[in-house]
């Protein structure tokens, strides 16, 4: 894993396709930090394009995806993960020579390989995953501080153009992110544990409690709310993520089941020293988290 530092580079044109919370935040951050001379955004729905044209961080919102990418320096694909490859294939014939395409999807692996293959010679795909977001969705909730001091994975393949990778790394760092490069497969293993597994735990805990007395929810303190905040995330979005990172999530779940079983066994056997040991290991891990940006 490598970490990079670069001077700010101003793009001639940044194009963002299918913006949601992340894509909208890319646009707002790019405008706030002067990362591009021109910001072009394309949305599939006509009413969304009309609304985007009124935003101060959008210079143009063309009616066609081909027009949106025709003069782009850097294209950011921001649809759900199950549409990234299709969108890469859709824009490939319209990209200018030298254009770089990246994404904000939370699964890489086969998606990165297929998107790379979709582009023509002389254009480049470099996968990205900014580890930022919230339970809120939509570009209407975008901010220009979402990426500040967060981590962004950049996931080049072995044959990805080195200069294109460097430019994508530099772009994300210019948004305020700490950038780490890993392979697509290593990325998927990491996020299965630190992002996708927590989503499973939060959502299934809420689903489990939903089958209990509804009045109990009103007695809950901050602990339950903090633990289950991400259960409020969009289910359709997470369904696609679980599908595309299925194997790694299943591996993480099996390992977590072993950890739960060990805790259950210690409790059943009244092995309280072992319970304390597990709780202390958990506390030590939690205490080493970096403080979130203010």
Image (cartoon, rainbow, N blue to C red):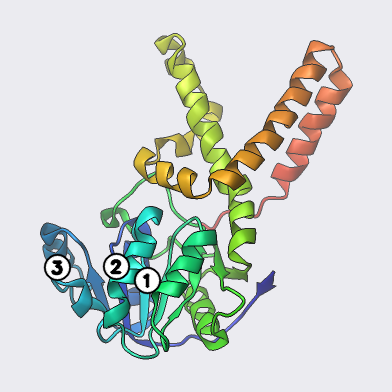
User: Label 3's element?
Assistant: loop
Q: Quadrant of residue 42?
A: bottom left
Q: Which residue is mark 2?
A: 17
Q: Say which residue appears at 35% left-offset and 76% top-offset.
A: 75
Q: Camera-side residue: 74 or 117?
A: 117
Residue 259 drawn above or below residue 247: above
Q: Say which residue appears at 50% left-offset and 56% top-offset.
A: 107
Expressed as whole percent of the image width and height from the top left, the position of residue 58 reads: 23, 73
> Relative to residue 26, is residue 38 drawn left or right?
left
Estimate the spatial distance between the alpha carbons at disc 3 and disc 2, rounded to whole Å.
17 Å
Residue 25 drawn above or below residue 13: above
Res. 54 mark: 3
The 10 Å Cα crowd at callout 3, few under 14, some 14 to 19, many 20 or more, is: few
Q: Camera-side residue: 155 or 60?
A: 155
Expressed as whole percent of the image width and height from the top left, the position of residue 85 reads: 38, 64
Q: Which residue is mark 1?
A: 76
Contact between labelled residues 1 and 2, with CB atoms less than 8 Å apart: yes
């Amino acid at each position: 894993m490598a970490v990079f530092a670069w001077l700010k580079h101003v793009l001639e044109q940044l194009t963002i396709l299918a913006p949601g919370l992340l894509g909208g935040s890319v646009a707002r951050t790019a405008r706030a930090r002067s990362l591009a001379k021109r910001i072009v955004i394309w949305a599939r729905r006509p009413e969304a394009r009309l609304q985007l044209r009124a935003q101060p961080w959008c210079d143009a919102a063309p009616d066609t995806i081909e027009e949106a990418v025709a003069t782009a320096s850097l294209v950011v694909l921001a649809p759900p993960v199950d549409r990234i490859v299709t969108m890469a294939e859709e824009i490939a014939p319209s990209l200018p020579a030298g254009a770089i395409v990246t994404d904000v999807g939370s699964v890489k692996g086969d998606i990165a390989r297929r998107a790379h293959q979709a582009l023509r010679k002389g254009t480049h795909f470099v996968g990205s995953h900014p580890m930022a977001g919230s339970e809120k969705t939509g570009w209407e909730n975008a901010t220009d501080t979402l990426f500040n001091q967060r981590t962004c994975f950049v996931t080049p393949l072995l044959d990805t153009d080195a200069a294109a990778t460097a430019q994508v790394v530099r772009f994300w760092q210019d948004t305020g992110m700490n950038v780490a490069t890993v392979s697509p497969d290593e990325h998927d293993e990491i996020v299965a544990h630190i992002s996708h597994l927590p989503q499973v735990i939060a959502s299934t805990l809420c689903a489990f409690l939903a089958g209990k007395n509804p009045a109990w929810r009103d007695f809950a303190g901050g602990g339950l709310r903090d633990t289950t905040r991400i259960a409020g995330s969009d289910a359709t979005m997470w369904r696609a993520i679980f599908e595309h990172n299925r194997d790694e999530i299943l591996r993480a779940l099996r390992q977590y089941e072993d950890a739960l079983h060990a805790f259950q066994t210690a409790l059943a056997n009244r092995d309280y020293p072992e319970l304390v040991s597990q709780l202390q290991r958990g506390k030590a891990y939690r205490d080493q988290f970096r403080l979130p940006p203010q």
